[in-house]
Structures are given as structure tokens and as C-alpha cells.
Amino acid sequence: MLDGNHTTVDWQQHSTDILVLPVGAFEQHSVHLPLATDTLQADFFGQMVAEALDAALLPAIPIATSMEHTGYRGSFSLRPETLMQIVRDVVDEATRQGFRILVVLNAHGGNHALVPVCRDINRRDSALKIILVNYWEHGELKVVGASPRPGLDIHANESETSIMLALRPDLVRPARADAQYASEERPLKQADLTTFGIGHISPSGAAGWPSGGNVEQGRALIEGIRHALIPHLRDRIERLRDQPRYAGPGGLTIRPLRLADIPAGVHLKSLAGWNQIDADWAMLLAAAPDGCFGMVHQGRVIGTVTTTTYGPFAWIGMVLVDPAFRGMGIATRLMHAALTHLQAVETVKLDATPAGRGVYAKLGFVPEYGLQRLTQAAVPAVTGDMDGVRPMEARDLETVREVDLATFGGDRGSILRTLWEAAPDLCRVLESGGRITGYAFGRPGATFSQLGPLVAETADDAQRLGRAVLKALRGRSALVDVPDAQPAFHAFLGSLGFGVQRAFTRMYRGANPQPGLVDRVYAAGGPEIG
């Protein structure tokens, strides 16, 4: 741990991002306990927490809000807004110094201003989050309300006296003044401290029975607090590490995506490092105007999923979630929305990343085959056999659709037409014996131009088509999604300097009665279209 006894170099070299701020008070504790009682306890429990969490420890705030002790000389109090501003200033500085979790350890029950200021800071979802704890609320023995006797037992009482006897017996005076509560029909309660100071309740200043305090009970209290408080904090810190957003999964709703949402979709795919561009989003929304969905927070799209129906089966793609909202089941909720929309379709397919494969398996998806994404930063000059390959023309699209229907297993004619219209200079067909036997599409992307889908009857034909498209991409970055069942095409791309970037698994849900001619698929169209 770190504290004020360490140097700035020590603090620079330590990697912790957890900071502990104890908050005490300077107020009367009857005739037997010092004015600094709450601050002494704040220091002690603050150090206990910092040691357990290997955190950085700030000195305790020695004066806080003790208005209920007004009238007892020596009791000093800050205005609530002053204490709140101190916390804000500490948070600002801690954030600048890279701390991400601030444990505010409160040792005085009257520091009510800590709750709204910590809550206000947390709900803004800035880089630093606060965990506010009142130390006495933890442990098998409660510091507040430990006595079975009737009446208030909240201050300078048996439990607090016991703790001080265990911590600083040298500061505990032998004379103790137990509270003398009158028998009243409506006695004053703790909530009445807003209207009546502690002197109305117990003129001695002790609200409780300190005479019963002893060192053994104090040690037991401290150990009980230790064994409850540290696990509590570790649990809360783990929760914040997993999902720091104040509202958690609350305040989210799903609605259909619109064309106006394309910039939000582009932003999400950029955060994920994906390759799609505006035109891809427009293509997917045009293909299924009512089948693409967004998770919305405060009017902003923070998650997406698209669906495209290809006749006997449908395709799911673009499952994206803003990193700031991950860990809340958003992708699963979006998938449920997509699957509900597609409930009349017998088979649903998708291409899963390794991280997504487990999520989709829980939804009933099973593997069909694997793919490898190969990339090249700059396509070299391509030579070799390209016999029979020519540019794809508009008149070829219907034939290409028919070949694709047999090979892919579903009708994606409108998608293929959109790809051709976007980049006709990158699309090719292979003719043999007066008929089209293969085809290849190319299209631009955010980082790479993509080759695919590419369909051919033989590996040699696939390489002819691949050469023709890659020749047009000379000097540009390119990617190709190659099925694992096409090692010859994989090797061909490797000879041109392509390397594996990532893996995908094609998965399906349902019967999959029309898998297509998988052995003729040499390059997929991409995870968004299949």
C-alpha cells in the first residue's frame, strides 16, 4: 500500500488504481472519548482497507459535518456543501492521476452529505467511480444499535467505546456517563437530530451506554468488521471492473434501425475495428428495412444486429456493442430480438468470432465449418493464368444469382446486385463452354478492400478469378475470408503475402436442409452477408 509516508516516486512507481479516502469528524464524544474519535477510527479502518487492497491511502478528512453536536465546545463542522466540494476536488485530482476507484470510508454517521455527492459523481459515468462505505455497517456485531436496551444507541456508546479501548486506550477516560432517557410517549429518535441537537436527547453527549465498553468487545468488533468489510469491497470493486456504468443494464430499449442510424453503426464498427463502410450498412437496411435492430440508450444507438432473409434461411450479422456497455447482456438481447423477428424462418446462420461462438452456442447455434480471414497490406503485382475471366456485366447478374443460389443455398440476388453496383471494376465472371461457371466480387472497405464472395468449380478456376480481382487491387490493402476446406486457395493467397488475421466459425440454428455446395465456396462474402 501507499500512504503519506511514501515519496512521490513511490506513488509514481506503484501500479494501483484504487485510492482510499477516510472521512472522520471533530466532535464531542461525551466525557470519556476524544474529539478526534471518528477521525482516529477513520484512519485505522482506512489503513486496514488500503493494506488489504494494496491501495493508496490519503490522510483522513479531520473535520466534516457534525451540526448535531452544536453547543459542545470543541465540536467543529463544515457546511455540507463544503464537504461535498472537498470530495469533488479529491475526485478531480485522483482522476488526473489515473485512479479509477475511490473508496470513501466514512467514520461518522452525521456525514450525510457524502451520499448525494458520491452518487452524483458516479451517475455521471466519468473515469473514476466511488464506493462509499460506513465502516460500522459491516461485521457480525454492529457498532450502531448493538445494545438490547431501549432508546438510542448511536454515539459514544458501548460499541464505540470498546473500539477506542482496543485502538487507543490511552485516550479513553475512566469516567463514563451513560444516557439517562426519560420515559416518554414519543421520545426523540435519530431522525429528530435534524430538528433537535444531541443535547436534547442526552445532555452528557453520549447516546448509549458506554459503561459496558471493554477492550475484548472492541477487538471482536474490529475483527468482525475486517472479515465483512474487505470481502464487501472486493466484491464491489469486481463489479465495477466488470461494468462501471452507473445505470447498469437499466434505461435501455430496442428499436428497428433506420437510415439515420448509419453514422452510429459506422461508429460502433470502428470501435470494434471492423471493415464495413456506410454503403454496407445502407445495403443491409435496404435488404431488411424491418429486420435490423438497435439497442438505444438516451436516444443513442449503442448496439446493433442485422438480419437478411435468403429464402430458406436467414442471416444474422453486425452484432456490435459499444465497449462502454459490454457485460450487460446487450448482445444476447439483440440476438433474441433478431431471432424473434426470424421465428418463421427454418434456419438461421451467422459467422461467429471466437469470442462470440460461446454466446451463440447458448442460443442453439452449432458449427458448420471454419473460415480464416487473410489480409495483405499491399497487394503485389499479380500474374498467371486468368483464361476465361472477364469483367462482370449487368446482363450477368441473373446467371450469377442462379449459380450463387445453388452454391450458397439461399437467394441473395439483391445483395449481389448491390455489391456489383458499388464496385463493378472489381467484379469478375469465369466462362467455360459458353456458360458462367464461377464469379468473384470485390468491394471497398474502411481498411481493406474485400475479395468475396468467390465461387468456382475447381481450385484452379478459383485462382484464376482471384488473380483477376487482386490484379485490380494492386498496391491496395485487401482481405479474403477463406473456408478451412480450401487449403489450395489459402496457399495461393499465402504465396502473395497474405497472412491470417483472425478466425470465424460459420454456425447455424435449425435443421439446415439446404447447406449449398460448400466445396465450391473459396471466399465468403463477409460476416455481414455470408
Image (cartoon, rainbow, N blue to C red):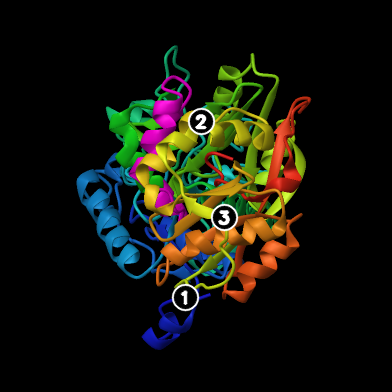
Could you tell me residue 422's position as x and y percent? 36, 44
Helix, strand or loop at mark 1: loop
Are discs 1 and 2 less than 8 Å apart at CB? no
* Residue annotated with mark 3: 388
Mark 2 neighbour density, 10 Å: few (under 14) some (14–19) many (20 or more): few
Residue 48 falls left or right of residue 517: left
First in sequence: mark 2 or mark 3?
3
Q: Nearer the viewer, residue 67 or 51?
A: 51
- Check disc 2 and give the amino acid type: Glu
Residue 296 falls left or right of residue 312: left
Q: Quadrant of the C terminus?
A: top right
Q: Relative to residue 480, is residue 360 depicted above or below?
A: above
Q: Nearer the viewer, residue 422 or 200?
A: 422
First in sequence: mark 1 or mark 3?
1
Are discs 1 and 3 less than 8 Å apart at CB? no
Answer yes or no: is residue 418 visible: yes
What's the CA distance linking mark 1 and mark 3?
20 Å
* Residue annotated with mark 1: 381
Could you tell me residue 86's position as x and y percent? 25, 57
- Check disc 1 and give the amino acid type: Ala
What's the CA distance linking mark 1 and mark 2?
32 Å
- Check disc 3 and give the amino acid type: Gly
Residue under the image location 42 percent in, 70 percent down? 474
Q: Relative to residue 490, is residue 291 depicted above or below?
A: above
Helix, strand or loop at mark 3: loop
What's the CA distance linking mark 2 and mark 3?
19 Å
Mark 3 neighbour density, 10 Å: few (under 14) some (14–19) many (20 or more): some
> Which span is picked out in magenta?
269-294
Residue under the image location 48 percent in, 42 percent down? 321
Disc marking residue 398: 2
Could you tell me residue 515's position as x and y percent? 74, 33
Q: Is residue 273 magenta?
A: yes
